[in-house]
Amino acid sequence: MNLVDLRFLAEVFVTLFVIVDPPGTIPIFMALTGSMTVRQRSRAALVAVGVALLIIGGFALFGQFILSYMHISLPALQFSGGLLLLLIALQLLTGKEDEMAASEGVNVALVPLGTPLLGGPGAIVAMMLFVQRTDGRITHVSAIVLALLGIAVMMYVFMRFSGGIAKVLGKGGVTLVTRISGVLLAAISTQMIFDAIRAFLADWGMLVA
């Protein structure tokens, strides 16, 4: 008897990988942890992954109940998350990423790294939709758990070894990549906002009909 649906596992993993984009977090992580020591950077990466895992896993288990209890729709969550990411993108584009970095070297791992960058609305919504598709089947539940753990490992590895990448790129290269990352993050956040508005309009059209 198969305990894991490999096809579903691959679908969940690929979807989360595209949304979370571990390689894309490297320039942001380097920008926010540039003044940290190697030990602080490693700790920040671990804390950020832990926070993201806790948030995504928590919403996977209790997200639908929380949103229903608070009368919040998935498009509303996606819209607010898009606005948060857009604010972060603007700070990266204007060279104000240092303002997001905490002096103690750990708070930055909570916000904005742990959330909303890693454990953001895109990953939360995707995970909630996957949970709805499980129908209680153990093969699908185990696939989701394994995919989430796999993504957590990927996130940590990419951030943990970002220091070596920073040495190769140099200070100017890191700045350039950070600005490019800000542009991409702004595009992603804008797309999230547009998708949320489209979903709002679709729901409103159904209500009118």
Image (cartoon, helix red, strand yellow):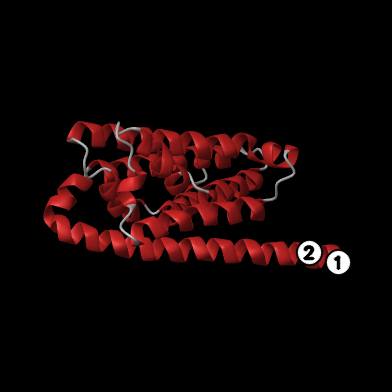
- The one of 152 and 72 positioned closer to us in this rendering: 72
Please identify the quadrant where the N terminus is shown.
top right
Q: Amino acid at mark 1?
A: Val
Q: x, y (%) of residue 124? A: 55, 46
- The one of 66 and 98 positioned closer to us in this rendering: 98
Q: Disc number at residue 204?
A: 2
Q: Disc number at residue 208?
A: 1
Q: Secondary structure at mark 2?
A: helix
**What is the crowding at mark 1: few (fewer than 14 residues within 10 Å), some, or many (at least 20)?**
few
**What is the crowding at mark 2: few (fewer than 14 residues within 10 Å), some, or many (at least 20)?**
few
Relative placement, left or right, of 35 versus 137 is left
Q: Is residue 184 above or below residue 30?
A: below
Q: Secondary structure at mark 1?
A: helix
The image quarter in which residue 93 lies? bottom left
Q: Amino acid at mark 2?
A: Trp
Q: Residue at x 66, y 45 (%)?
A: 132
Relative placement, left or right, of 177 versus 11 is left
